Amino acid sequence: MTRERELYGIWRDTLRDDEAFSAELAAIEQNDEEILDRFYCDLTFGTAGLRGVLGLGSNRMNIFTVRRATQGLAQYLLSTCAHPSAAIAYDSRLCSDIFARETASVLAANGIQVHLYQELMPTPALSYAVRELRCDAGVVITASHNPAKYNGYKAYGPDGCQIGPEVAQAVLENIARLDYFDLPHMDFQEGLSKGNIRAIPDSFVEQYINRVCREALDTEAPKKAGLKLVYTPLNGAGRRCVMTMLEKIGVSGVAVVKEQELPDGSFPTCPYPNPELREATELGIKLCRELDADMLLATDPDADRVAVAVKDGGDYRILTGNEAGVLLLDYIASTRKRMGTLPVKPVAVKSIVSSKLTDQVAKEHGVELVDVLTGFKFIGEVIAGLEAEGQEDRFIFGFEESCGYLTGGYVRDKDAVNASLLLVEMASSYKLAGKSLLDVLSDIYRRHGIYKNAVSSFAFEGADGMKRMEEIMQGLRERPPAEIADGRVVYFTDYMTSRRVENGVAAPISLPPSDVLEYGLENGSTVIIRPSGTEPKIKLYYSLVGRTAAEADALEAAYSRACEALIGV
């Protein structure tokens, strides 16, 4: 009998008395491949918490893997805090509310005070609750933009950032010693009645929205411009907070995509609810055409990321996360200069895979630009460092190319409500000046050159997927290419070893170790390769510089073909 079959038998026997659980396991009894995939490993707990396909099994998201992870977190909190407390939020995904209650029940059974949102909320609202309620930890149940079959569990520290590697490792070590089925667990209703679990009041949600509204720079522009706006929450958690925020800043008559307005974890209109994808925003763009709208906003299911589409001739174009990020940095810096509110020595932060055009815009406005590893917690750490030095006001903007943005230190995660506010304000301000966002982007390109950024993703599903990804990364690490798409590689950075090799000379870099490889080419372009932290994928990021848009497009096509061959797909 294989180990997977043995584990399957333990789960089947343990859950025999539950009709639904027993039926699910009985249905796969003759399916060796399915049993292997469900039981070949434990769902890994890391800095991104848990993320996996819904279903029974050790490699699935279910109440037992959630309880086990929560007990590991509880033991860590009890070992490091005298009287620990935690906040919990959840999005619209299938079982999110159930997993949130299970998390609360396990924490409460361990004597940890729990604060639980009463309705689905954006992920940044969890970060806000952790900070405002002075909690020692936070958990949000979400799988962000993954397909409907996924859910996830993200853990936060007392600073409102996602937990770092050291805490994740300590929690993981606790989890490894635990059984799946014999764990402390308080009845949820009992926890509420005894006060071990406290509902976060509705007034606190309004407090969060009001705090977001304080990030506005030009409070008059949205009221005067008459921006025609379409919004879709993609059946996720953004509707209440985004719509309330828009009303508060004076934007009226917002059209909401009806098919995607209400929470629905099956995401019936978009199998992959990623607002960066045309497929997910097609209904919103269709409504924009019908209404001749100026702009579409689309927040992802947990409302920490937002994409924007703008009128482009007779159709609508989705701005990339890099384009929107560059526009926001330029707008924030120039507007604050004009208003006299730009701090001395302003700081912006971006991830290493985000557009290098940001460097040029930051330099133009006298903004110090800090590069960090991928993951918004690293941007949060920069804000925390400034706060510790009494210089938090120096932070003006942080962004990742995947449509994650933030302008204030009130949370330590990307915030689609905050970003939606600034995007609407920016578009309104430029509309009053007779310009579109595409006009402004063209101006930036004229000043700094045509920068083209693109991302390719390659999936490696199943039991052999992770092994294949490791082999590819190791091969590229040991045998870095001398050329990519006929361009000579002039430097190679291995973030795992924290060193860069240029012209045969190795030098250290200041960022912490991470499984990321970067190749710099003689024409100024770069290619970055990294495994996704949340999905079984390898991602390739291209940053290309051309004299014209056509030249940049040609470079993208050439680099995409070359890199597909490089990783053997």
Image: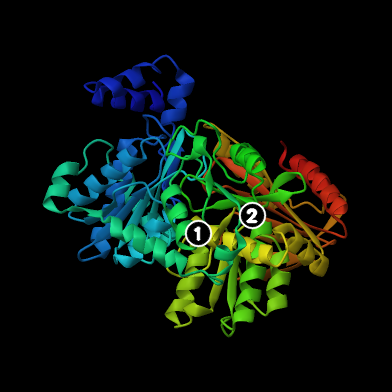
Location of residue 78 (image quadrant): bottom left
* Secondary element at image label 1: loop
Residue 481 shows in the view: yes
Task: Look at label 1 and name its amino acid.
Answer: Lys
Q: Position of residue 215 (x, y in %)?
A: 49, 69
Location of residue 515 (image quadrant): bottom right
Q: Residues within 10 Å of mark 2 (few under 14, many from 20)?
A: many
Task: Identify the mark nearer the N-term, 2 or 1.
Answer: 2
The residue carrying mark 2 is: 321
Residue 352 lies left or right of residue 189; in this view the side is right
Q: How is the image coloured?
A: rainbow
Residue 497 shows in the view: no
- Which quadrant of the figure contains the C terminus? top right
- Residue furthest to the left: 194
- Please tell me which residue is depicted at 35% across the width and 35% down the height of the picture: 62
Q: Nearer the viewer, residue 15 or 158?
A: 158
